[in-house]
Image (cartoon, rainbow, N blue to C red):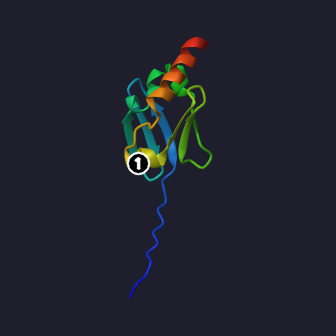
């Protein structure tokens, strides 16, 4: 007998976000808390405390957006332990624009 198995995975929604000088911490609706180094996300690491604290949890609850830093982090990547995949060249361009505007 041959068949196809279909699995549906439901991601937990983000309920709370806190960020310090070195750690991004995300609380999930299922009771888990994920903490990762902000060094994984260079734009967060270079952001000021005010810029890092200005974020929005997406309306669906599966992502976080920092408008001042043009950074987006999804729950799927956090659960998988994925670091930023921004290229070094892209980050350097962002950093140059940031330094010019200050």
What residue appears at the point 58 percent right and 12 percent down from the top-left corner?
100
Q: Position of residue 4 (x, y in %)?
A: 44, 77
Image quarter (top left, top right, bottom left or bottom right) of the C terminus: top right
- Does residue 14 sit above or below 18 in this rendering? below
Image quarter (top left, top right, bottom left or bottom right) of the N terminus: bottom left
Quickly name the residue at label 1.
79
Dot 1 crowding, Cα within 10 Å, few <14, some 14–19, many 20+: few
Residue situated in front as seen by the camera: 97 or 48: 97
What residue appears at the point 44 percent right and 53 percent down from the top-left corner?
30
Q: Position of residue 16 (x, y in %)?
A: 50, 40
Q: Secondary structure at mark 1?
A: helix
Residue situated in front as seen by the camera: 81 or 19: 81
- Does residue 98 sit above or below 19 in this rendering? above
What residue appears at the point 51 percent right and 26 percent down from the top-left corner?
52
Q: Residue 45 occupies which quadrant of the picture?
A: top left
Q: Position of residue 32 (x, y in %)?
A: 40, 48
Q: Position of residue 72 (x, y in %)?
A: 54, 37
């Amino acid at each position: 007998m041959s068949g196809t198995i279909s699995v549906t995975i439901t991601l937990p929604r983000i309920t709370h976000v806190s960020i310090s000088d070195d750690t991004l911490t995300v609380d999930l609706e299922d009771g888990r808390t994920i903490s990762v180094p902000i060094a994984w996300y260079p734009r967060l690491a270079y952001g000021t405390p005010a810029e890092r604290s200005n974020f929005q949890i997406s309306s669906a609850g599966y992502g976080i957006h920092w408008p001042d830093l043009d950074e987006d982090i999804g729950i799927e990547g956090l659960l998988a332990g994925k670091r930023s995949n921004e290229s070094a060249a892209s980050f350097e361009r962002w950093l140059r624009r940031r330094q010019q505007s200050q």
